[in-house]
Amino acid sequence: GSLTKLAYYSTVQHKVAKVRSFDHSGKDTERDHEPPYEISVQEEITARLHFIKFENTYIEACLDFIKDHLVNTETKVIQATGGGAYKFKDLIEEKLRLKVDKEDVMTCLIKGCNFVLKNIPHEAFVYQKDSDPEFRFQTNHPHIFPYLLVNIGSGVSIVKVETEDRFEWVGGSSIGGGTFWGLGALLTKTKKFDELLHLASRGQHSNVDMLVRDVYGGAHQTLGLSGNLIASSFGKSATADQEFSKEDMAKSLLHMISNDIGQLACLHARLHSLDRVYFGGFFIRGHPVTMRTITYSINFFSKGEVQALFLRHEGYLGAIGAFLKGAEQDNPNQYSWGENYACSSGLMSASPELGPAQRARSGTFDLLEMDRLERPLVNLPLLLDPPSYVPDTVDLTDDALARKYWLTCFEEALDGVVKRAVASQPDSVDAAERAEKFRQKYWNKLQTLRQQPFAYGTLTVRSLLDTREHCLNEFNFPDPYSKVKQRENGVALRCFPGVVRSLDALGWEDRQLALVKGLLAGNVFDWGAKAVSDVLESDPYFGFEEAKRKLQERPWLVDSYSEWLRRLKGPPHKCALIFADNSGIDIILGVFPFVRELLLRGTEVILACNSGPALNDVTHSESLIVAERIAGMDPVVHSALREERLLLVQTGSSSPCLDLSRLDKGLAALVRERGADLVVIEGMGRAVHTNYHAALRCESLKLAVIKNTWLAERLGGRLFSVIFKYEVPAE
Amino acid sequence: MRRLGPFHPRVHWAAPPSLSSGLHRLLFLRGTRIPSSTTLSPPRHDSLSLDGGTVNPPRVREPTGREAFGPSPASSDWLPARWRNGRGGRPRARLCSGWTAAEEFSRARTLSPHGGPSLVRGLTSGWRPRVLRKRYLRGPPAPIVFPWFGLDIGGTLVKLVYFEPKDITAEEEEEEVESLKSIRKYLTSNVAYGSTGIRDVHLELKDLTLCGRKGNLHFIRFPTHDMPAFIQMGRDKNFSSLHTVFCATGGGAYKFEQDFLTIGDLQLCKLDELDCLIKGILYIDSVGFNGRSQCYYFENPADSEKCQKLPFDLKNPYPLLLVNIGSGVSILAVYSKDNYKRVTGTSLGGGTFFGLCCLLTGCTTFEEALEMASRGDSTKVDKLVRDIYGGDYERFGLPGWAVASSFGNMMSKEKREAVSKEDLARATLITITNNIGSIARMCALNENINQVVFVGNFLRINTIAMRLLAYALDYWSKGQLKALFSEHEGYFGAVGALLELLKIP
């Protein structure tokens, strides 16, 4: 077509913060003023998939772009698909000195479709023209097969996809995008596809089509018919001797083609008993007009039984598929991939109502980048109903008020993040410059999201946080809080023995409450929340005890502590899975004493921490050191670690939030193996912004302190209100 | 060309259209009879017929003064001036037991000065039920008076069937009112009426026995846009004096009902068009085509040398997929004489072909469009599979000759400049036909039916489309589906309406 889509695989060098235990050979060393571990920044190489879309006229510029970015590549072959594979073969081969392999279009398309459906959250959406937002994103379904893919290019191909490698062409139609374009050009003398769509969006098809009311007169009303149904497309141009406007003809043509495709898709869906139909191809490609008419037609013909779904990265499917095919020996499918929000352009509303300048922005150059994640991600086996699980509590695309608030909140916090980023790299000469670039990038993302909240799927607090992390990483600020975390971990470790001693001095019942309060107080230490980071910045000695005083008195905002206490009087849990939040006081003085009590009850504990850094959240590697240090002080933890009754695992995530449908495969296996029957989720990001409504198959404890006035008020409480949500699944 | 409207209540309509919310209403109505004051479903067995005889039996021949039936202005329409001022015919007052429709109309108008729906309500609730009640109370209906018409008013074409009795006794001849006679003579002695009315002489069914009368069945069509002239002619010629009721089907039966009443003083008996269609097809198939078979199919449709049109004996008609291609397309699954459902429909029908041809080529008649199409080459316009893949697309088993994108070549400026009007007409014909074939095939698969009968005026003199349908169905179903056609392709609705008039089951 007129757009070229290129996919390439590159390795990206990133600075990564590593932590390493000191070698404690000298046992008597006075450690009070030493950090508990050392931090080093290393270069790490991660694999990244790049997808670029641009107008064919820009091909040379684009090839230069790729050439510049193709560093250290050993690639010798480039995979190409589509008609342009023939057209630009020589140019690409000469420019990049790579061999061009031509791949089968449909195979590529389906491979690409499977890939995005599996790897990109909120990839698919339904389009509803008159609702706000127009885009309704679907949560990723764990079982993507079988589905029907209707690709509307020049013609229409309808493919039933049954498994990763098995698909079947079940039908097609010659009436497709080429018909709209070709016939449209003949009828209206308008040469460009986009212009035709623009014409169509302004036309009145009823001037050209013979409607039911034209045939029935006014009687359609008394017959209960909609007079607006089209009886015969272009029917009026046969009976009336008049001139028709370009707009009206284009509109009529659009309706005719969309309806026809929708009808055929429904007939095929019914024949194969499928209710999910994905639409793709240049006819659809983000054009609201065509998405709208297709959706309408599908609803009409299937009476709502079939859902018309569109894909955010529809334009890349072929390129992704071609790439995957070429990379078969590396088998990218064995990895999990994550969309990099920092580098991807996001979905643009290609509404014809937008000016051509705005459209050009989306059409001429568009990027999608995906990072290869270290490990494959899977569902938490304890989810009650994986297909209906939605991590996020509030959909900001839906909730305009909340969206406005959070976007502003993130804008206001940006200065602090920039400052923190610069401060984290005092030895770097270009830190300030990079931090400024980061600011620009993230600011622009926030502005884009104000205009197009749907740009990266459903907008949530989680996606805003993740985008910020991605942007920081992009400018080599891998872990701006590493020093803060190091210091806080050191302080907290020194307090650990005292805290445990005073807990042990309490009676059983008092101790249980103190442990929970400790968990909550620890959770106040969160650099993610502006209210807290202000206090922390101004008063670094803000202590554990002071935090406890800040907490809301019982009864808490959400308070099922009594039920929890009653449960504790019963038999111990077999195994608890705990998702930790912040480092420092939170993990050391809050979580570990709680863990210790569980261990003493005879409950095994799986402590899950983030694989990569996010804010001041404790990372898996930090947790290993912390646990080791605590084991040195506490025999309970020591023996539990040795006997593998306490296991430290990574979540597979680098987000301040938690998506229980994308967790490390090893964690999932362990949860299954140990028969976890209690899940503890701690912190605002993991238990309030996400998972607040998550339903599990076992008991769960969600606790957090609301450290944001707006959110607290929204929930009906005040700053530092406590959420203590203990849930037992219904029998 | 006739199109089937959605008025059968079990039916959902063809193509969604403008995205108005009114549509949803329709969807919900599926499966229920739509209550309507203009009640579309005349009672199945006792339809409101003209014989009115039940009310006052021998009134048919009652002479009435000529003066009772308005003057006859000079006529410019396509029916002759002769056709007027018949004597005889009872005033419809009898039908309505005391009210004439005209009186009822003026009464309704008084009640509802703004006209509109209340007008309709007034008319129907006013007198029709009373008639029905009386008819039930009286004995069997008397013989139906001539003339016998069946009317099907489609979106593009009006189809009229007329039964010409050939067994008129001398006595009858003598008693026959002048206007009746002139109608008969006029219709049977001409093949064209005015500039647009045409009698399809080759379709005439000879020596047919209907309701105990022997005669010929004539098939006449004229464009729907001439309907006002037709009604005006009815008024001028005082049709109403013939005490006849027009049994009419098609959307136009609704659209023009008021005009018939107010201008022509004629009461239309509106009939369900799908009922009429099926009735008509089954009847016509049963009487054959003057000793020949009504139904036929094509052997070797793709091979112009070996292609043969062969008779088909529709002895096991059920189940049957009926594809009626008028201006739009309706697809019905027929399981028995009175068990059928409308499966779907599409707005890409004959009207689309002709409409697009008019826009693309400037042609003015359907015949002209077809003639151009017969001389064109669609492969210059369409993008074929081989244009994209260089040959067959083996991965999907697509032959190189298959059309990949209709009008796909027209995306390119050079190619747009290189095509002729004939090529465009051909491509339009192929596009519409292939699409209908494809939807019909999917419906046949979904309904598990393997014989598909294509009817409707789109197929009139349209061998290209018929052969293409025959070939496409056979090819894509790997020989599982058979495309059948019928000689009287577009007239079944009108025939069904006539059968309703005669109450032939």
Image (spheres, coloured by chain):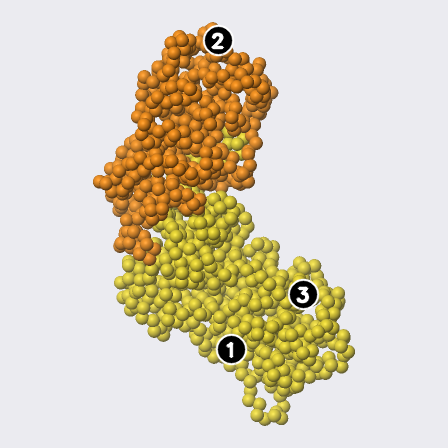
Question: Do the residues at discs 3 and 1 belong to one chain?
Answer: yes
Q: Residue furthest left?
A: B305
| Residue denoted by label 1 | A17
Question: Which residue is depicted at the point 49% across and 74% down?
Answer: A431
- Residue A515 location (% of width, % of height): 71, 75
Q: Nearer the viewer, mark 3 or mark 2?
A: 2
Quadrant position of residue B229: top left
Q: Which chain is orange?
A: B
Q: Secondary structure at mark 1?
A: strand
Q: CA distance from mark 3 to mark 2?
A: 90 Å
Of all chains, the one bearing label 2 is B
Type of amino acid at the residue the image marks with label 1: Ala
| Residue denoted by label 3 | A728
Q: Which chain is yellow?
A: A
Q: CA distance from mark 1 to mark 2?
A: 110 Å
Question: Do the residues at discs 1 and 2 belong to one chain?
Answer: no
